[in-house]
Amino acid sequence: MFPDEFDYYAAESVPEALELLDEHSDAETELLAGGHSLLPAMKSGLSSPDVLIDVSGIDALHGVSVEGDTLSIGAMTTYSDLLDVDAAHEHAPAFTAAVEQVGDEQVRNRGTVGGNLAHADPASDLPGAALASDATVVAEGPDGEREIPIDDYFFGMYATALDPGELVTRVEIPSAADAAGAYAKKPSPSSGYAMVGVAALIETDGDTVTGARVGANGVLDHGVRLEPVEEALVGSTLDDDAVEVAASVATDEVDEMMMMSDLQASAEFRATLLEAYTKRALAAAADTATPRAAD
Ligand SMILES: Cc1cc2nc3c(=O)[nH]c(=O)nc-3n(C[C@H](O)[C@H](O)[C@H](O)COP(=O)(O)OP(=O)(O)OC[C@H]3O[C@@H](n4cnc5c(N)ncnc54)[C@H](O)[C@@H]3O)c2cc1C
């Protein structure tokens, strides 16, 4: 299908994009990043913006850097460009593990980190990893720059803490260079999106877990942290028994009434998947944790 007609503007800077957003605030306006969620929605008639503001060419929104203890990812950095940066794997192992599993190579060559988190599709791969990585979403709007901790960011299906006039400019991730990270995903057989995906970031001191963050997507209508799993892990020796015990509490604080239920998976099946894929993510993280705890 062809999308409805729209006006197109290519912004060359963040101030220009913000000006355009303000100028068209009375119209239905969308930002165009990689276009890999927006354009399918427009072609299928699910979205009919009057105005498209293309932010993909803004140089300042591209690139990855390490500043002190923080990995900074420009919002328009494509998944492929992020995966090409060794420092990203080193400092954000859970996040890059999830990015590696987004779609296929064509999708990873076009889709962007900022577009993914702004779109907040519950079945996408980055919400759980952003939660596990303790990311901060940095947005710029008419009142200047705002830092949104990831724990306060996701609200519901396609709903975030972003205001309509705001633009995500970068995502900041505290360095987890000493931690082990992993992402385990049950892809939908038809779309490849996550029926359930679990990201884990685990810090150890010797054999003992000293810190853990675990996030999931595909389960509720927004990304969710699995705090009972984190609590069960801390203090454990991260052996097979500890992984089993921690995974067994994955659904403890996830209300089954609120779990996604669709043609692909009932809520009950998703609960089973959540426990199974939590176990896989933890086991994969345990395998990369140094030193490896004795089984
Ligand atoms: C065949 C296919 C398979 C896919 N498989 C997966 C998968 O397995 N896992 C997965 O996670 N995703 C998957 N995707 C989605 C893909 O990752 C998208 O790239 C992503 O969801 C959106 O990023 P984008 O850069 O393409 O954003 P766009 O589609 O350009 O924009 C999406 C939305 O975000 C808003 N937006 C974009 N940038 C900003 C910004 N800087 N600030 C504020 N708002 C902004 C736009 O206004 C729009 O509403 C798939 C897509 C396709 C086409």
Image (tube, rainbow, N blue to C red):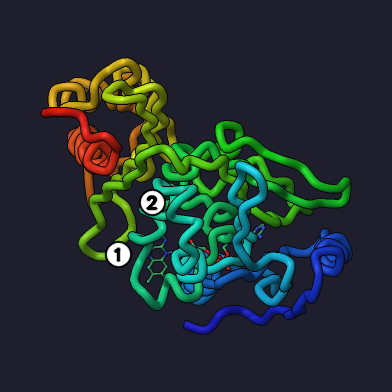
| Left or right: 15 in relation to 64 | right
Q: Where residue 253 is drawn, which disc sits there?
A: none
Q: Quadrant of residue 198?
A: top left
Q: Position of residue 188 (x, y in %)?
A: 25, 57
Which element carries disc 2, helix, strand or loop? Answer: loop
Question: Is 169 above or below relative to 293?
Answer: below
Quadrant the C terminus occupies: top left
> On the image, numbered disc 2 is attached to which residue?
123
Residue shown at 27% from the left, 50% from the top: 185
Residue shown at 74% from the left, 67% from the top: 60
Pointer 2: residues within 10 angstroms few (<14), some, or many (20+)?
many
Tell me the kind of residue under disc 1. Answer: Ser
- Whether residue 45 is visible here, answered yes or no, is no
Question: Is 67 above or below relative to 20?
Answer: above
Pointer 1: residues within 10 angstroms few (<14), some, or many (20+)?
few
Q: Where residue 191 is drawn, which disc sits there?
A: 1
Residue 288 vs residue 23, the one in the foreground: 288
Q: Position of residue 251 (x, y in %)?
A: 28, 25
Residue shown at 52% from the left, 40% from the top: 156
Do the numbered discs 2 and 1 sit on residues whose CB atoms are within 8 Å?
Answer: yes
Ligand 1 within 8 Å, label 1 CB: yes
Residue 289 vs residue 32, the one in the foreground: 289
Question: Is 38 above or below relative to 284?
Answer: below
Ligand 1 within 8 Å, label 2 CB: yes
Question: Is 256 above or below relative to 270?
Answer: above
